Amino acid sequence: MDWGSILSQRMSRMKASEIRELLKLLDQPEIISFAGGIPDPALFPVEDYQKALAGALTGEAAAVSLQYSVSEGYLPLRRWLAAEMGRLGVVCGVENIFITSGSQQALDYLGKLLLSPGDTALVNWPTYMGALGAFNAYEPAYLRLNGNLGAAEVRAEAAASGGRPKFAYLSADFGNPTGETLDRAGREQLLDLATELDIAVIEDGAYQHLRYEGEAIPPILALEQARVGSIENCRTLYCGSFSKTLAPGLRVGWVCGASAAIQRLVLLKQAGDLHSSTINQIATAQVAETVFAAHVEQLRQVYGRRRSLVLEALAREMPEGVTWTRPEGGMFVWLTLPEAIDGAELLAHALKHQKVAFVPGRAFFADGTNGNTIRLSFSLHEKPAVDEGVRRIGQAIREMMARPA
Amino acid sequence: MDWGSILSQRMSRMKASEIRELLKLLDQPEIISFAGGIPDPALFPVEDYQKALAGALTGEAAAVSLQYSVSEGYLPLRRWLAAEMGRLGVVCGVENIFITSGSQQALDYLGKLLLSPGDTALVNWPTYMGALGAFNAYEPAYLRLNGNLGAAEVRAEAAASGGRPKFAYLSADFGNPTGETLDRAGREQLLDLATELDIAVIEDGAYQHLRYEGEAIPPILALEQARVGSIENCRTLYCGSFSKTLAPGLRVGWVCGASAAIQRLVLLKQAGDLHSSTINQIATAQVAETVFAAHVEQLRQVYGRRRSLVLEALAREMPEGVTWTRPEGGMFVWLTLPEAIDGAELLAHALKHQKVAFVPGRAFFADGTNGNTIRLSFSLHEKPAVDEGVRRIGQAIREMMARPA
């Protein structure tokens, strides 16, 4: 059986990540890793999950928790999320909330909902590589969202690719990989462009709650609602996740948007995996209702301190010619290296000689350019590891810079 | 925002189920329902899940259970499944096992892996409607697998649809909706056809373990392995599920097959939802290791008795002109009514006048024919409800038969 010969067309776009292969080396204990964009497991609300899961299996609750459930999601969780979206400035009801198995599944289903082969997705250069992975399965062309293209140019380019523009995808708050924030004026401009193009906006709010300084800017969905009145008139679909605030292992995320879009996502869910884990949704609702706000406040303290440690170490250790972002939240700092240095080559060198890891930046660009970039995650380490790890990165960069051209 | 105008082409294939709308009426307590194909929650191994989930959150285990994990699935669960597939006659290793969020997701990912728009899927008339739902998203044409088409005819029809045949999908053991078994000769013939067409076989084993009488027939994958030696040479991909044996609410299923296919499914999983719930996989591994065989034996006793009750009641209550299957396992009996009676009309009548429910059969046919069929699930009821419910169905059929033509 030659599997290569009977695959769907889309599989030509689905490639194993080279980075993933490189990062398998991370099992070596002496390596200091800034690679994985993962929450610190020491901060998981373990006792709250213990209580919630035990409760979900006590008495009559067990028959519900272990059974099939509806594709749109567990109603009390949707109710809590509608209220939480309200706290973020979005007025909505349960009919505007759809539960997914993590926000990665939201991106997959949104690609599935909107993209035919040859359609165009607008994404930032760089953007979350997992979004590119999800969308690639639906064979879009990409155009650069943060490249100042006007509506006429976008339309012309999209037509040249054989389709039409369908959505703009972005994370407006401390997104993966740069950690940067789109200011209010930028959000309004984006809405202007999306309205002119008559396309959807996919707002990835995975890091929304993790702000460590500065004033919160309303989500794009809230700004659009201020323009058009009802959420039912909005083109923005907000994707949220409990992975960064509570725990990723239960795979619970959501989409908030116009019910006309939500209902169609429910059809995809029914056909795709019936529903997300019933017991995990019940436990998440319980934990969210009980400790969400207080727990997020604790995360902000810890991750905010770790971000500052990394920024201080970068200022101390980076050679001339290296620049980086100064995120107000999230988990990532994004470094731009001298043009001659490729992030993947730097990683290979640094793993071997300095025993330090990070993620090379090229895979975050839809066109595979800008190889002279790397992403550091600051979610896991305290001062000793940060100081030593960033020192090692500086040393690796210096050694690469000193190579004969 | 007019969502209808920016949807992907595939969304024209994704429709809300009329049946689902009808069955929302089931909340009325006086209705006896044979509709839902769901396991009896009274039979869930609740205490075993309580122990397993508590253990997964105790001490250092919590940091793993609540964290991100690998896309291929939790290794000890894959190891147990490789051994379990061995007990079913399939020699394989962990590299041949891929964990999914229920076997519905396996069907979705297999459609995604193999189908480009216009390709052909061979399915039985009738077949599991959830498989049609999953595949529809990838815009195939369908041909009838159990219609005695030869390879040349299949190729010609598929070419006329604008693609090529990619796979045959079926449940060989007590499948949804008919409960029938494909005998060994039928399985061998299917393998002959698939080999001649050089297509994959998707074997849906969701009900595999629930045999109540007769001798087990090896899975198609096992029969193919006997022909070709190694699983790496097999074209059959076996989809399994814990939903019918342990509990559906955790959403844990698997695919077993050649590693060349498994590795590509892992790419789809990484792009689709990263991985299935970590804690649910850990708990499922624990429960499977501890009680799987004994628990399945208990299910066989209970469901087997309920099947016999339904068959006895049907023999007693059905009017002349109604025929039905006599399943050796699973959860379903399939009824063929006189041609003039439409199953959906019968359901509307029976809900209103007899307060009894079942699933009309048309949606199980890829071409929407054979409306004179209905599916009864026998998983939930004991003798009093079975006797009264089947009596009511008989009465409803008689009333429909007595209508003026």
Image: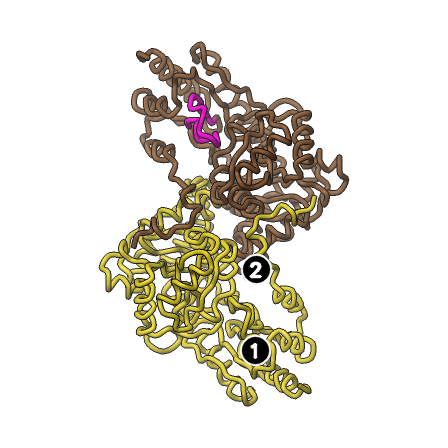
Chain colours: A brown, B yellow
Residue B33 appears in the figure: yes
The residue drawn where x is 33% and y is 12% is: A405
Left or right, B205 with respect to B321, comes to: left
Where the N terminus of chain B falls, by quadrant? top right
Q: Position of residue B47 (x, y in %)?
A: 47, 59
Q: Output the chain of dot 2.
A: A
Q: Position of residue B380 (x, y in %)?
A: 53, 72
Kindly indicate the quadrant of the structure image that contains residue A199.
top right
Left or right, A173 with respect to A138, comes to: right
The part of the chain drawn in magenta is: A359-377
Residue A88 appears in the figure: no
Q: Position of residue A274 (x, y in %)?
A: 53, 56
Does the magenta segment cover residue A375? Answer: yes
Q: Output the chain of dot 1.
A: B
Where the C terminus of chain B falls, by quadrant? bottom right
> Which mark is in front, 1 or 2?
1
Which type of secondary structure does the marked residue at label 2 adopt?
Answer: helix
Which type of secondary structure does the marked residue at label 1 adopt?
Answer: loop
- Number of marks drawn: 2
Q: Which residue is mark 1?
A: B372
Q: Position of residue B319 (x, y in %)?
A: 56, 88
